[in-house]
Image (tube, coloured by chain):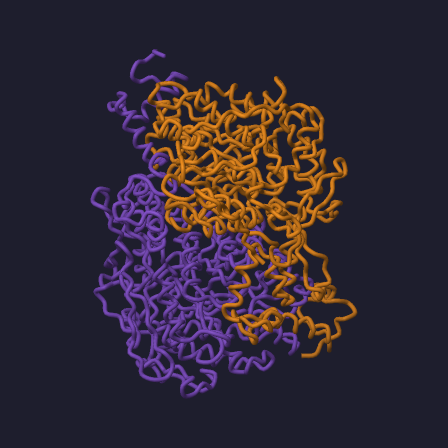
Chain colours: A orange, B purple
Amino acid sequence: MNQTTQIPQTSGPALPSVTTGPLPGSTRVYVPGVLHPDLRVPMRQIALHPSAGEPPVTVYDSSGAYTDPAIATDIAQGLAPVRGAWVSARGDCVAYAARAVQPADNGFATGERLVPAFPHLRPPLRAVEGKAVTQLAYARAGIITPEMEYVAIRENLGRTAASGSARDGEDFGAAIPDLVTPEFVRQEIAAGRAIIPANINHPELEPMIIGRNFAVKINANMGTSAVTSSMAEEVDKMVWSIRWGADTVMDLSTGRNIHNTREWILRNAPVPIGTVPLYQALEKVDGVAENLTWEIYRDTLIEQAEQGVDYFTIHAGVRLHHIPLTAGRVTGIVSRGGSIMAKWCLHHHRESFLYTHFDDICDIMRAYDVSFSLGDGLRPGSVADANDAAQFAELETLGELTRIAWAKDCQVMIEGPGHVAMHKIKANMDKQLATCGEAPFYTLGPLTTDIAPGYDHITSAIGAAMIGWFGTAMLCYVTPKEHLGLPDRADVKMGVITYKIAAHAADLAKGLPGAQARDDALSRARFEFRWEDQFNLSLDPDTARSFHDETLPKEAHKTAHFCSMCGPKFCSMRISHDIRAAAQDLGAQAEGMAAMALKFREKGEVYLPAAEGAE
Amino acid sequence: MNQTTQIPQTSGPALPSVTTGPLPGSTRVYVPGVLHPDLRVPMRQIALHPSAGEPPVTVYDSSGAYTDPAIATDIAQGLAPVRGAWVSARGDCVAYAARAVQPADNGFATGERLVPAFPHLRPPLRAVEGKAVTQLAYARAGIITPEMEYVAIRENLGRTAASGSARDGEDFGAAIPDLVTPEFVRQEIAAGRAIIPANINHPELEPMIIGRNFAVKINANMGTSAVTSSMAEEVDKMVWSIRWGADTVMDLSTGRNIHNTREWILRNAPVPIGTVPLYQALEKVDGVAENLTWEIYRDTLIEQAEQGVDYFTIHAGVRLHHIPLTAGRVTGIVSRGGSIMAKWCLHHHRESFLYTHFDDICDIMRAYDVSFSLGDGLRPGSVADANDAAQFAELETLGELTRIAWAKDCQVMIEGPGHVAMHKIKANMDKQLATCGEAPFYTLGPLTTDIAPGYDHITSAIGAAMIGWFGTAMLCYVTPKEHLGLPDRADVKMGVITYKIAAHAADLAKGLPGAQARDDALSRARFEFRWEDQFNLSLDPDTARSFHDETLPKEAHKTAHFCSMCGPKFCSMRISHDIRAAAQDLGAQAEGMAAMALKFREKGEVYLPAAEGAE
């Protein structure tokens, strides 16, 4: 099922090969728009065995064209720029000659060490002078963009009417609709409660929405470091991560070749790509934080905005007077961006240029529709430091900055911790909602204990599920390698699947309409011994199948009414079927067991359908 | 570090080999008693690098003599029966000739297929006629047994005084003491809020306590099935599971050789062993549930009580009139024991013999001090079925049975679900506390979504951490193989580590005194780049080390001030150290950074320690 598309190699570094082909039992389908009939909104349909007598189960699909066998993907060509027509139709952008790529953009890599430039570069677009080309600006103007209708359709997963059944869940004051309409999307964006990260220079994007009143999303981090990894690996990891459900990808590359690696990733990414521009800026000053300047940083923002990065993490909330608040911490400052800016601030005895030039940054963001992800540079790196003065002081500043960015029509989300024991998680969400005007919260975990390096995908999935339930809109994954090394392909998959679990658990708990349909379909398959359906409906069909086959590999066992866990005699589900049959034989056919139950509750103790009153 | 002790094989099935030797950097130490000076209560001390300037970190140790290189363990001899003297000193037991082992006890296995009998059998003990030899009976009589003092010392992990510092946590009305005293243990047991599962015929036991006001414990399930696994594997898995932290082990064996396998496990188990006697009883009637009788079941209880099983899961709460309540469920009855008893009840049109003979069962339990684990035969097997009428009706019955068992001086805990979405978890805990008089709750997960077979250790760790926080006393692990097959050694370890995470996260959140010490020590090691300390303090040092070494294998990197995740230039922790140094250079030595922070908050915006007022 999984194929690997190898790009013929010419010279220089290896070109990427990525995994393509549908997931087991799955078909990528497309739903058209109504307001914008040319939209083709992707979803994944999982077919069930005919014996189920059920329609296919539709699930969210972030995997892009790579899982559609009808589309020939080619990494060296990039994905089709479908969104380009929507952007140009708005008539508020102009194409211009791109900023020239400098040797420093790629860390002065040359020859064999230089990642080749992506072969098909387009001239970048930017807003007509003075215009804001952001989804927020359009939403405020009452315009429902193709992007807005796209995400509305996408969130509904093929549902076209509210179910009418009672909602099950606790949403802590959110306003989750029964059915997402394009107008609801527009309102949420206009209110700042949701964002669609969608740079006008990223036409390959399949738009998605991040907000408390929608499905919880997940982000996968990747990127090269000075110590390890290559461009080909990073492109492969990006495609691999979206195959398993990453909704956005952050390219956190450091070291050489940052510019060219990012171009390859963007041109092949159907999901929003986020970055931390400070990392590249720091490379340009050879890692000496004090040598950073606004001019170098500004140039880096434009460089990346022109390439199409959809959101920037900007640690503008680290203010000079916050830094001493970290002095008593067990783990100081653990955000890379936060520590770099803190060092700069202390060295220069000044507020950071991110804070003092925040208005200028907004002007760049609005000209390309790059969304803010306001970084939590002072997040806690240990449970001892959670919810401390430094963390919450920065959050207040992020609230201030949110209002400034909104005044400039910029889309904003807010980054959150970190390491937080369970009893302190809800305070983070409540404070973020109150301080940041309900701008979407985007948290890393949080990790609920510090004692399990090697398993921090799990320590953090606990916190992530909870904070997702409480209202966090997007969860940044943590892989098993957290604190220990750079994640490889297997780690990326483990991180993504783990966070799909956390996000889905949150969706169930907050009562997202339709979310439980997949659980119910899988549970019915389990109860009816439709093993293939159970595998195919799971988040990772390959692993579910291989675990089953370790002890019962034969095809015949795929219809067996037991597994190796209990064996045939002790299979509770098989016995449950016997019980149902027995109960029916005992005369329950007419009234059904539920009605019988009522009768017993009325009559008291004795359950004797066949011979009432007998012992 | 890990050695394998191979027992020379004679004939017949393979004899067990188990992993022995200390964990990295660790020493098993023993703390004596005060009331009972001969007690040697085990703890594990993790030594830190001299540069830390810190004492060793003491952690709970469930691993038994296997991690003590000073003790030569021999699977064919069994562990030393240290507890035997405490039991006999009470003078309320008599030794007698054991019930003769029947061919049916081992599923009529013969010759090569028969697991050999354990070579050193002791005559069993039972209470003097009419006596209750339970910890509950002693507690009520005001007696502090050696077992009670043992667990008090064990819970304190070497702390001998309350810390005096403010407690951090939300305990939802629990009564967690600053320091556990033997008298507190006695009171908790007398109140039924805690149990020490400790069969008088299990003298190899290192006592442990299960209760809401103590550290959260975890159980690891194992056992053969008709389809796979062997005695040698099960003994190995038991030792392996306690090496990683399992507090109790349930032997859920089915198929042949149940009796002899259990004997090998018990004689080598320093942790309480639980079983579901119904499984063996069903094997004795060749898997035909309707043919079960009270007499066969009763004989099985005595067989297992004589061997030393510490707690029995007994599904006496499945009443006839509950069964129709499961008719509308998505996944019917998913408890093996529950489904077997439901089938029996329907076939015979009667209440189950577990319910009608509950008094008789109590008489057996009190004669050996086997604790009840009242089974949740009607737990939900899918999120759709959570918190339904069947589940809660059974819980009411479990409350009734608890009071009957308590009247007979029997120790009781209550089993709980299952599959429950996050927003429905707390209701389970609240209802259990209210219905069952605060008897300890012992839950399987709960799994917070159904859509991730292959990852149900994670779907359930989320629910387990939460319900542990809310007050559950013991968490039954779930392995990655749940729903798919029998767990192997790797699955057992993954399940145990995952549940140690959940239990510890719960301890932090409920504010268990001292729990955060290990987190803090590890975080300090992380911040100070003491890599070896970070590995050794983690729940799984071997995995943490191997993940780190995948990208930076050299010994020199064990003291490097970075890892491959960020590389040297982007290491926030390294930069944090620079920041601290810089801040100190700037004149902060005298007053400290915390005082400076206060000053800034008083004065407002500007942070200029070196040249106040200058720009």
User: Residue A393 falls in which quadrant of the image?
Assistant: top left
* In the image, residue A363 above or below residue B447: above
The number of numbered discs placed on residues in the rendered structure image is 0
Residue B576 % position (x, y): 33, 32
The quarter in which the N terminus of chain A is drawn is bottom right
Please tell me which residue lies in front, B248 or B87: B248
Residue B135 % position (x, y): 38, 65
Please tell me which residue lies in front, B521 or A557: A557
Please tell me which residue lies in front, A89 or B71: A89
User: Residue A212 falls in which quadrant of the image?
Assistant: top right
Residue A368 % position (x, y): 58, 26
Residue sitting at x 34%, y 80%: B118
The quarter in which the C terminus of chain A is drawn is bottom right
Taking the view exactly as shown, the residue that stands out farthest to the front is: A10
Residue sitting at x 45%, y 71%: B223
Left or right: residue A552 versus residue B6 is: right
Left or right: residue A602 versus residue A73 is: right
Res B546 visible = yes
Taking the view exactly as shown, the residue that stands out farthest to the top is: B614
Residue sitting at x 72%, y 47%: A159
